[in-house]
């Protein structure tokens, strides 16, 4: 067994980087967003990280194709129960090295998808991606935002600070260059270990015994 | 067994109305938001509907207290595994007539919370409420927004149309008066039956057999 | 808020009793099992407890009908996403006072179903009920077994002790009389508070800080 | 995208084989069970399949070590939210090539664990393994039972046929030799495609439209 970490995740394993973004809607066809998605997939694979997405079409699939160009190991977290449902009902790609069929539908899939990754990258994005952002934010997962990729990715500080009146924590990083963004995200992953549990607000220290 | 509906939910049962909103952060202390939360809880109870919230503090708890003033039947969907964890770790109220302990944490709790209701009302709200909004939106659940209650409730059309570039469907209704809002929400619940499954985009008609 | 319990659930609320058992297969048609199921539903309602089942056909539905004879408040935890799916795809009854539509399918529904109850009663039962028993056992939920009701209910000590080589904990009680069984189950619920978390084996005391 | 299958999963990807069994209790220390667990892990890796377990101690970990001897690609599906919780609270190993942190606890972890695999192997096993067996059985997942490995693995036909009064379907296979068992399991995976959805009893053909 790896040595037990003292204060957080060791990350002695290969880093796992998730990519989220528009799987439907107008951002999916934006050539700039598609190019940025492909580039981040390439960058993840070049660095030897494990690539994860929701086994969905759209920008996360563009990222997958980029990761495969550089022989990245790729994982898909599917909402479907089986390959057959994945292909026939969700009409989704499954060219990954490994697909986890959760059978849980989109919403729970989004949760498992995020928790599977040491850090997540967001490119473009509509309502579904906003769902994933709010999960990652609330659970303290490190997030890299590809700026100028359209959709909510252009508006995260506006959404968090002005609309929700919350803070941008230091483990959310921004850049429109995939190399710089990955440098920042890796630094955030190592600097800010995840909380012990998903409900990080829980006050264990008050428990008796 | 009740007669089988032909095209959607019958709603021959008592309507179940969920209330979502800030359980932490600055909106929780806004006196206008708190008053509006209490009023919607009162209105739900006056109409004989079942009141549902996430068994959390904040604006949904203000709504609970309003519902209890008018003897509403109240249900809480807790993230905790047990009453003891609910009280000691989540520091949450449990004065409901019935608390469902999911043991699933905040994120999955949000999903069950929304699916438990025929329609949901949003008052105030930060990141957690935005998570709940995106779930209800994506799954086609009727939503009533209490406008001018602060937080994301002031910005839903902006978020959906300008930031996410999606449409406001006709089962999302808006008003700053609790009576008018409930009239609109009830009409939306009856006019727009839920899709068969949570993944409403699934194309069953293409299946063989 | 109710006073904070010192060592476990207060149970100052109405007790919630779940009923599990065969929803398909041969036990479902056994007249003795059906009668025992009806009787336990009646007994739960007579005592003023909230009745919970999985909103399924079979023995749990016989128990529901018994509970309704005595005006019990009844809750169903459905695998379906909507009433329409519940009726048309799951072909299931929904005469409860409140149905929670989880949208999670049978397996996760079973988990929520058990966690919703302060204690569960098992009558008859095949593979699906065995699934529910193993969840309740592993999570330390009090269980009342109606003996001589067929299926696994006749074999729980054999399964636990001889096949699995585990112990029967004191919060699992047995009787073939519904009145005696409910006396024993209520005593077990009050004597053995639930663990803090679902994963009761977790060693919090070893955590730093 | 791979060609769309006509009637079920294509299995053009590397097969994913899960290994379940005692993670605690007396079977965990049985030398025969431990040797059989190691052998099945070795066999899975020798055949080039992806090895999956619940990232738990005990027999599934013995299988993991066997798979690693033969350079198998290994995946763990953890109940924990983070590596830190995995190591400190669950006291569990994480030497896998990839750990999926679900944050869902044991019971939901069991469900995802099973759905992740094309087929599962059961060795030894107590209550927790019985839970996993009932999930795999109910959802129609191919199962290989290592006979004479102790615990429930010696008693599956007895449990299914005599206690639950159900049938042993043809995609559940038995052998005490790991090579023969894997031959049988691979044949079952290819012969019996998974149902479309987890709730295979759902009657889609009756739906309107």
Image (tube, coloured by chain):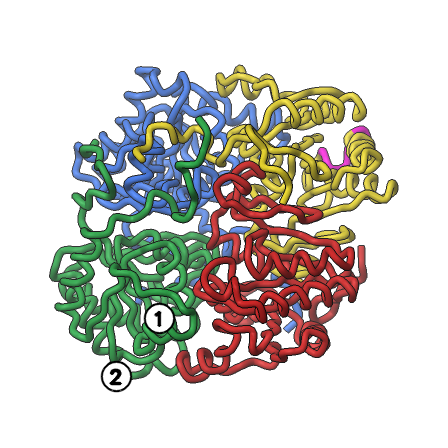
Chain colours: A blue, B yellow, C red, D green
- Crowd around label 1: few <14 · some 14–19 · many ≥20 (10 Å): many
Magenta span dominant secondary structure: helix
The one nearer the camera, C64 or D60, is C64
Q: Position of residue A72 (x, y in %)?
A: 21, 40
Label 2 SS: helix
The one nearer the camera, A3 or A124, is A124
Q: Residue at x 55, y 20 (%)?
A: B160
Q: Which residues are magenta?
A: B27-32
Label 1 SS: loop
Question: Measured along the vertical axis of the image, is residue B153 above or below residue A95?
Answer: above
Q: Residue at x 32, y 16 (%)?
A: A32
Query: Where does the N terminus of chain C fall, quadrant-wise?
Result: bottom right
Please give the residue where the numbered disc 1 appears in the rendered image: D57
Query: Where does the C terminus of chain C fall, quadrant-wise?
Result: bottom right
Q: Position of residue B32 (x, y in %)?
A: 81, 28
| Chain for numbered disc 2 | D
Please give the residue where the numbered disc 2 appears in the rendered image: D31
Is C175 left or right of B43, judged from the image as shown?
left
The one nearer the camera, A143 or B149, is B149
Q: Find out whether residue B31 is within the magenta segment.
A: yes
Q: Residue at x 42, y 61 (%)?
A: D86
Note whether residue A60 is visible: yes
Disc 2 from disc 1: Cα separation: 15 Å
The one nearer the camera, A54 or D132, is D132
Is B29 left or right of B108, judged from the image as shown?
right
Q: Position of residue A2 (x, y in %)?
A: 31, 64
Of badges 2 and 1, the one in the foreground is 2
Residue C141: image quadrant is bottom right
């Amino acid at each position: 067994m790896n040595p037990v970490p003292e204060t957080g995740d060791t990350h002695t394993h290969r880093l796992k980087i998730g990519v989220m973004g528009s799987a439907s809607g107008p951002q999916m066809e934006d050539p700039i967003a598609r190019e940025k998605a492909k580039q981040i997939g390439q960058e993840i694979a070049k660095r030897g990280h494990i690539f994860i997405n929701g086994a969905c079409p759209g920008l996360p699939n563009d990222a997958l194709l980029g990761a495969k160009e550089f022989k990245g190991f790729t994982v898909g977290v599917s909402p479907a129960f089986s390959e057959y449902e994945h292909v026939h009902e969700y009409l989704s790609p499954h060219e990954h090295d490994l697909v986890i069929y959760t059978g849980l539908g989109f919403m729970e899939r989004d949760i498992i998808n995020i928790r599977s990754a040491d850090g997540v990258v967001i490119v473009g994005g509509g309502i579904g991606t906003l769902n994933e952002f709010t999960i990652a934010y609330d659970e303290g997962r490190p997030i890299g935002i590809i700026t100028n990729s359209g959709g909510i990715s252009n508006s995260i500080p506006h959404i968090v600070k002005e609309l929700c009146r919350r803070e941008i924590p230091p483990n959310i990083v921004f850049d429109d260059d995939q190399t710089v963004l990955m440098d920042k995200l890796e630094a955030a992953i190592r600097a800010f270990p995840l909380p012990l549990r998903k409900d990080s607000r829980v006050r264990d220290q008050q428990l008796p015994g």
